[in-house]
């Protein structure tokens, strides 16, 4: 019993002798809440995903893009796999020459990246969407996506290397010629 009392007295003495910086840890802090992310097993998320993969390997890019799109649309908006499916769909639509569908899917990939808290991927997908808008012949969308990517780069949330890369990509996309008729 005496030992416990001595232990308590020693513990109280240590607490009193702690530097004031330890007390600062008790001060209220700004709270950041991470976004909720859902991840489905792809084969369970949608059987369309497996069929789309087969069509891609067979070279039917448009059909594969449509199935990746359908698979992504069947997943929750905050599912990281929907980001992958939208991104694949956008790239396949681009290779198939469907530039409007490609840009729209890249925009959705950027939205999902933002919803899952991946601002880095969102910035890069906006650069991709700006590039696709050039092929689409839609300068208004190019400007919109360049501005969105630039906002991510200037937000302070990305590391310096990505900020530099995104800046270089933005300058590259901005220097490409396009028909300004739209």
Image: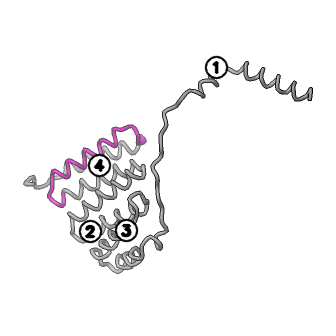
- When the figure is inspected, residue 139 is found, relative to residue 152, above or below; the finding is below
Residue 132: give x, y in percent of width and height. Answer: 23, 59
Q: Badge 2, how many Cα within 10 Å: few under 14, some, many 20+?
A: many
The kind of secondary structure element at disc 3 is: loop
Residue at the farthest left position: 181
User: Marks 4 and 1, how far apart in space?
Assistant: 48 Å
- When the figure is inspected, residue 24 is found, relative to residue 47, above or below; the finding is above
* Left/right of residue 112 with respect to residue 35 in the rendered view: left
> Residues in magenta?
134-160
In the rendered image, residue 138 lying in the magenta stretch gets the answer yes
Q: Name the residue under label 3.
A: 74
The kind of secondary structure element at disc 2 is: helix
In the rendered image, residue 93 lying in the magenta stretch gets the answer no
User: Marks 3 and 1, how far apart in space?
Assistant: 54 Å
Q: Mark 2 points at which residue?
A: 93
The kind of secondary structure element at disc 1 is: helix
Q: Which of marks 4 and 3 is in front?
A: 3
* The label number, if any, that marks residue 82 in the structure image: none
User: Marks 1 and 2, how far apart in space?
Assistant: 61 Å
Q: Mark 1 points at which residue?
A: 20
């Amino acid at each position: 019993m005496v030992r416990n009392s001595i232990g308590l007295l020693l513990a109280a003495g240590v607490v009193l002798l702690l530097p004031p910086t330890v007390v600062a840890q008790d001060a209220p802090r700004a709270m950041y809440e991470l976004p909720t992310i859902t991840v489905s097993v792809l084969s369970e998320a949608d059987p369309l995903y497996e069929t789309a993969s087969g069509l891609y390997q067979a070279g039917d890019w448009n059909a594969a893009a449509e199935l990746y799109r359908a698979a992504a649309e069947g997943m929750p908006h905050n599912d990281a796999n929907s980001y992958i499916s939208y991104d694949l769909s956008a790239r396949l639509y681009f290779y198939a020459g469907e530039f409007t569908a490609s840009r729209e899917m890249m925009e959705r990939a950027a939205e999902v990246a933002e919803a899952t808290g991946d601002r880095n991927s969102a910035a890069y997908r906006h650069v991709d969407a700006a590039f696709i808008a050039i092929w689409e012949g839609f300068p208004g969308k190019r400007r919109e996506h360049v501005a969105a990517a630039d906002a991510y780069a200037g937000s302070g949330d990305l590391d310096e290397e990505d900020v530099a890369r995104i800046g270089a990509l933005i300058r590259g996309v901005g220097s490409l010629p396009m028909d300004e008729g739209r």
